[in-house]
Image (spheres, rainbow, N blue to C red):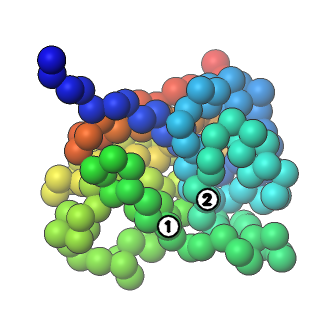
């Protein structure tokens, strides 16, 4: 009998700007964990997400006040054999490291731009789930899903509004 790595589903959300869409909650239902990449704007957003799964969140440039003071600017978590770095603005990565893969980082989750994207560079998977909050310009309203199996991670993006 062969053993298979357990699949861990991590919901990715960012830039909610104080809006918890029912479509986002429905998309995230059943996740093992949720990562919020900042610009949350109110503790009630995190409370709503925590009803679904444990939440790792970072502070975005619009997260101010006493409730936000406890949020880190960046966070690292390890799921199975994948280490995930969470930041709000990808531009802030420069201050952290030149060689993320060498430091064991396999995935970087960032928000801020409101532009959903998945890219791989130098062995690191970069995911921006886009914005799940109020629509900005003509950018899509979206969230993402990170699937971790052992040492392997893949990501998908999901439009929340048509």
In which image quadrant can residue 49 be found? Answer: top right
- Which residue reaches farthest front? 1
Instruction: Indicate whether 94 appears above or below 2.
Output: below
Residue at image position (82%, 58%) is 42
Q: Secondary structure at mark 2?
A: strand
Instruction: Where is residue 14? Give x, y as percent.
Output: 60, 49
Residue at image position (75%, 71%) is 68
Nearer to the camera, 161 or 138: 161
Instruction: Indicate whether 147 appears above or below 14.
Output: above
Instruction: Where is residue 132? Give x, y as percent.
Output: 66, 39
In which image quadrant can residue 155 be found? Answer: top left
Tag 2 near tag 1, CB within 8 Å: yes
Task: Determine which residue is flagged by label 2.
Answer: 57
Task: Give residue 92's mark.
Answer: none
Whether residue 40 is visible here, answered yes or no, is yes
Task: Give residue 75's mark.
Answer: 1
């Amino acid at each position: 009998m062969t053993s298979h790595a357990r699949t861990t589903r991590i919901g990715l959300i960012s830039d909610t700007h104080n809006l918890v869409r029912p479509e986002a909650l429905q998309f995230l239902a059943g996740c093992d964990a949720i990562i919020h990449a900042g610009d949350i704007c109110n503790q009630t957003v995190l409370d709503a997400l925590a009803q679904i799964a444990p939440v790792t969140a970072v502070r975005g440039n619009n997260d101010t006040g006493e409730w936000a003071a406890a949020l880190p600017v960046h966070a690292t978590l390890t799921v199975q054999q994948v280490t995930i770095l969470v930041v709000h603005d990808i531009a802030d990565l420069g201050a952290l490291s030149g060689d993320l893969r060498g430091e064991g980082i396999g995935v970087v989750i960032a928000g801020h731009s409101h532009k959903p994207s998945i890219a791989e560079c130098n062995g690191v998977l970069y995911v921006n789930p886009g914005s799940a909050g109020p629509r900005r310009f003509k950018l899509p309203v979206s969230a993402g899903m990170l699937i971790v199996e052992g040492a392997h991670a893949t990501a998908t993006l999901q439009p929340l509004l048509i």
